[in-house]
Amino acid sequence: MIARTSLSWQSDGWQQELAAGFRRPHELLAALEIAPERIETSIDCDSPFSMRVPRAYARRMRRGDPADPLLRQVLPVAAEQRAAPGFSADPVGDHAARRGAGVLHKYRGRALLITTGACAIHCRYCFRRHFPYAEEHTADNEWEDAVAVIAGDGSLREVILSGGDPLALTTARLARLVHKLETVPHLSRLRLHTRLPIVLPSRIENGLLDLLARGRLKPVMVVHANHPNEIDGEVVAALARLADAGVALFNQSVLLRGVNDDAAVLTALSEALFTAGVTPYYLHLLDRVQGAAHFEVDIDTAHALHRQLREGLPGYLVPQLVREVEGEPFKRPV
Ligand SMILES: *Cc1c(COP(=O)(O)O)cnc(C)c1O
Ligand code: SF4
């Protein structure tokens, strides 16, 4: 018999877990023993950006707490339908940066490749919630086109696999892409932007670790955690396996009202990340995407929080507070 703990490291264990995630708000609330009427705004069961929550993530939510910071990140609410001035469908100018075949080129030396529209979790504040993923065809032959775009630009040193979530692809598909990228001589780094090590740590299975450890390109991973409660023992173990495979680990967070707009929470997050071998990298101001206005933290509060982090943490644990501005040559520090 296979021990229960080793099961989650099997290559298809994570896909079963993904399929078993919560898809209906009332089912998640029932599991958390929260009566729906205790949620302060009404729940939206028919959002076109449907609810999606892995059970591994839901297990870290506090039972009976309608204000839980993890629950708030994933529960679809009616407030998402309110139009807010200044909030648009494409707040960061991704359309303008498209080079075709899912390649976005905004910053020197780095190109970002949209590998898939799929995510294991649907974060309600996601700036790509309206992105027309269907147009970014992700069949393997299309990666030929994406790799050709990257191979044709000798100024590139790094490819960032993004999405959606690149680790929502199977390891076999990811390997086919990575092996193609390895043939491009001017590339030296492979970066993955992924929330899967946090929300579905069983995704960090041996096949993926081999792919990252044995490749020609230096692997870098930027994970995405917003609250220290997201980092439990399973996540710490997954991150340790990545570090052992030689992956450089960083974290980006989004500053979110009612989730992490609190200096003590952000301090605890930086400390938990560092203990898990991850360096805090960016703290993003919310991208002003339609449907996310209720998560916005005003700029003065953001500055004050960042200052408190500076006062309370060693400099290397203070993430850069940034905002993405369309047309700028880098993410703008604020
Ligand atoms: C954020 C981003 C990058 C990476 O920027 P860094 O400052 O290197 O983290 C690259 N390309 C695009 C399109 C991005 O949005
Ligand atoms: S994991 Fe990232 S891309 Fe996916 S829904 Fe969340 S914020 Fe968006």
Image (tube, rainbow, N blue to C red):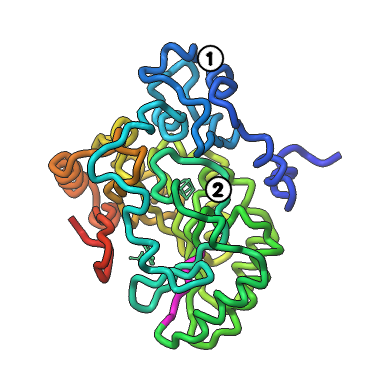
Which residues make up the magenta segment?
156-161
Residue at coordinates 25% horizontally, 55% vertically from top-left? 323
The picture places residue 17, in percent across and down from the top left corner, at: 68, 40
Write down the residue under mark 2. Answer: 119
Tell me the kind of residue under disc 1: Glu
The picture places residue 113, in percent across and down from the top left corner, at: 50, 67
The picture places residue 205, in percent across and down from the top left corner, at: 67, 54
Q: Nearer the viewer, residue 321 or 243?
A: 321
The picture places residue 216, in percent across and down from the top left corner, at: 58, 79
Which image quadrant for residue 56? top right
150 on left or right of 203: left
Q: Residues within 10 Å of mark 2 (few under 14, many from 20)?
A: many
- Dot 1 and dot 2 residues touching (CB under 8 Å): no
Residue at coordinates 48% horizontally, 75% vertically from top-left? 189
Residue at coordinates 39% horizontally, 51% vertically from top-left? 274
Quarter of the image for the C terminus: give it.
bottom left
Write down the residue under mark 1. Answer: 33
Q: Nearer the viewer, mark 1 or mark 2?
A: 2
